[in-house]
Amino acid sequence: MSRRRAARRGVPTSMALKPIVVIAEKEFWERIRNRWVLAVALVFAIFALTIAYVGTARQGVIGFGGIDVTIASLVSLVVYLVPLIALILGYDAIAGERDRGSLELLLSMPITRLELLLGKFCGLAAALAFSTLAGFGLAGVVVSYHVGLAALYQYAVFLASALLLGWAFLSLAVMVSVTTRNRIRASGIAIALWFFCVLVYDLLLLGLVVASDGRLKRGVLPALLMLNPADVFRILNIFGMEEVRRIYGLATVLPEAMTSPWLMAAALGLWIVAPLAVATWRFK
């Protein structure tokens, strides 16, 4: 049985790397050619430099301050912007092909559904990584020039966590794209998902804490925070530096055993793998 027939009949076939790379390159260069990635990188750079410069205003000082205060200011920017860009980037990965009528053509080629999905995700992930590294990386170079090269390591850790956050929401966007029938519905679900994870979820947790008179702090609340990749990103950066812990009141919520940077990075990794696994299962 040929590889194409096996894929169309649902018979498991070995996954090849070359089709994934070809599809990923196509997705990446399409974003580069339409200048979407460059525009996002420019937006990231402008916002990051602005936040880094005025982030110390709460302390009565304007200018580039310490790296801890800078990262604390940039965390909020990343939580709002990166998930939104990732969801917009990936919501039509499959739904868009279905609307344009090109999905059947792609599936008629000698590639499996898994290869198509992974190729799409890898290409979009590379585009998101390019814009994130270019935008926030430029801000990091400027900040390190003013506060010292020793701050580059801490900033690199922050930048890596921002990438993981973006890929987690990109994975969610691909899952939404697979499970919806058209781009309009997929875009609506993607925006609702951003609104819920970034804005509503923490308000609901705060309401639970108030309603329970604080009893959730040492019990259910830490586990609930892990159910939101945006909160995992916050925790990863909050507990990485002493000064940032003092700025955020959230530092008193979690037990010390759950504040390991490696544990939080693994949690973000799980948020990348799990939705993509669901998308793969549904796409088959």
Image (cartoon, rainbow, N blue to C red):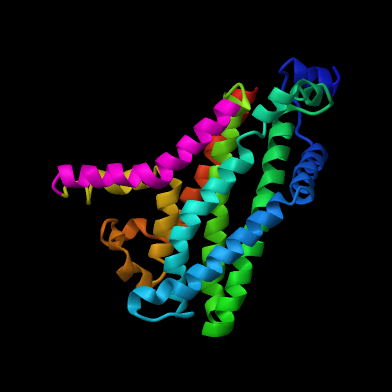
Could you tell me residue 211's position as x and y percent? 16, 42
Can I make out residue 263 in this image? no
Can I make out residue 187 in this image? yes
Name which residue lies at 67% across and 34% down: 93
> Quick one: 163 or 39, which is closer to the camera?
39
Vertical arrangement, residue 236 with respect to residue 111, above or below: below
Number of marks in picture: 0
Res 122 → quadrant:
top right
Res 227 → quadrant:
top left
* Magenta highlight on residue 199: yes
> Quick one: 138 or 153, which is closer to the camera?
138
Residue 124 falls left or right of residue 273: right
* Magenta highlight on residue 240: no
Res 123 → quadrant:
top right
Vertical arrangement, residue 32 with respect to residue 97, above or below: below
Name which residue lies at 76% across and 31% down: 14
Look at the image and tell me in which quarter the N terminus lies: top right
Could you tell me residue 223's position as x and y percent? 33, 45
Look at the image and tell me in which quarter the C terminus lies: top right
Residue 176 falls left or right of residue 107: left
Name which residue lies at 32% across and 68% down: 247
> Quick one: 117 or 100, which is closer to the camera?
100
Could you tell me residue 100's position as x and y percent? 74, 25
Vertical arrangement, residue 225 with respect to residue 173, above or below: below
State the residue lying farthest toward the top: 9
Magenta residues, as a range?
Answer: 184-213
State the residue lying farthest toward the left: 213
Q: Main secondary structure of the magenta part?
A: helix
Name which residue lies at 47% across and 42% down: 194
